[in-house]
């Protein structure tokens, strides 16, 4: 568990880019430490924030899991024949840019206002991305979450997770460092539920047009 701040009600936007960057640095250091263990094949970083998604500890924190295998979702991305993130997304889906980073709404997201944050060049993981990019990620987290707060209100509940190269020693050329930032609302005060058709059939019915969600998030940026 990584504590983001001694302040109980802190958030990435209230921490600011510098302090958010220090959290990212800790993620990178723990990736190196856990990834060096022979029983860890994948380092998975995540944050759940808000009682609406079952968080039991309100103090701002993230978690890091060391998996003995590569989990199914990142493995499916890694076994692709090409890196989908190296192709520029439709400009209608772009939310914002920071040096070295681009954020966009996926064309078919599970969560209507989900933001996919990826390096704008092919970088495999947090440790090898370098200090400049890790600092930029701190700024990007502040930017993206500030936009979500402006759309949904303060204390918006969300999930965040990081996909990066496995630590099993194999070559994974499709590994492209990226994060998913997923608020669990479809509009202010209304939870977006994954229901039977989606969970049972694996077919997602998005209640908000992705381009419309991206437009709202773009408009919620700095004046």
Image (cartoon, rainbow, N blue to C red):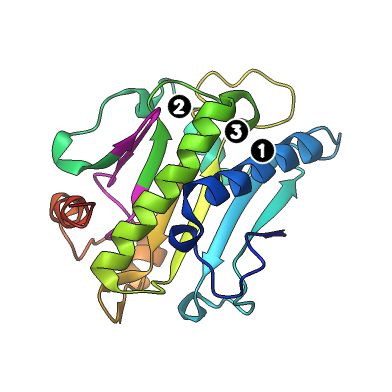
Q: Circle 2 — which element?
A: loop
Residue 104 belongs to magenta span: yes
Boundaries of the magenta span: 97-115
71 on left or right of 202: right
At horizontal 36% and vertical 74% (from top left) the residue drawn is 154
Residue to which mark 1 is pinned = 28
Image x and y of residue 137, in percent: 47, 40
Q: Circle 1 — which element?
A: helix
Dot 1 or dot 2, earlier in sequence:
1
Q: Residue 203 versus residue 73: which sits nearer the camera?
A: 73
Marks 1 and 2 in Cβ contact (< 8 Å)? no
Measured in 3D between alpha carbons, the distance from the residue under mark 3 to the one under mark 1, in whole angstroms, is: 5 Å
Q: Circle 3 — which element?
A: helix
164 on left or right of 209: right
Question: Which disc number belongs to residue 212?
Answer: none
At horizontal 66% and vertical 38% (from top left) the residue drawn is 28
Residue 111 visible in the shown view? no
Q: Residue 135 versus residue 209: which sits nearer the camera?
A: 135
Image x and y of residue 85, in percent: 37, 29
Res 196 quadrant in image: bottom left
Residue to which mark 3 is pinned = 126
At horizontal 42% and vertical 52% (from top left) the residue drawn is 142
Circle nearer the viewer, 1 or 2: 1
Task: For label 3, count other residues whose C-alpha is less than 10 Å away and answer few (under 14), some (14-19) or many (20+).
Answer: many
Circle nearer the viewer, 2 or 3: 3
Residue to which mark 2 is pinned = 80
Marks 3 and 1 in Cβ contact (< 8 Å)? yes
Image x and y of residue 178, in percent: 47, 38
Measured in 3D between alpha carbons, the distance from the residue under mark 2 to the one under mark 3, in whole angstroms, is: 21 Å
């Amino acid at each position: 568990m990584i504590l983001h701040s001694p302040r109980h009600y802190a958030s990435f936007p209230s921490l600011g880019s510098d302090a958010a960057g220090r959290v990212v640095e800790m993620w990178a250091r723990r990736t190196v430490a856990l990834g060096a263990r022979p029983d860890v094949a994948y380092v998975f970083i995540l944050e759940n924030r808000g009682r609406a998604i079952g968080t039991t500890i309100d103090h701002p924190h993230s978690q890091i899991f060391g998996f003995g295998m590569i989990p199914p979702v990142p493995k499916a991305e890694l076994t692709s024949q090409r890196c989908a993130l190296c192709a520029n997304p439709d400009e209608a889906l772009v939310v914002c840019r920071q040096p070295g980073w681009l954020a966009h709404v996926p064309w078919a997201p599970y969560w209507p206002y989900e933001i996919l944050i990826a390096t704008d060049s092919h970088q495999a993981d947090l440790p090898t991305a370098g200090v400049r990019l890790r600092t930029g990620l701190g700024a990007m987290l502040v930017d993206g979450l500030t936009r979500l707060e402006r759309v949904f209100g303060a204390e918006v509940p969300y999930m965040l997770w990081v996909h990066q190269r496995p630590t099993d020693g194999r070559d994974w050329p499709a590994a492209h460092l990226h994060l998913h930032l997923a608020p669990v609302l479809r509009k202010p005060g209304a939870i977006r539920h994954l229901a039977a058709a989606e969970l049972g059939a694996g077919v997602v019915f998005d209640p908000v047009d992705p381009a419309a969600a991206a437009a709202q998030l773009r408009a919620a940026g700095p004046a």
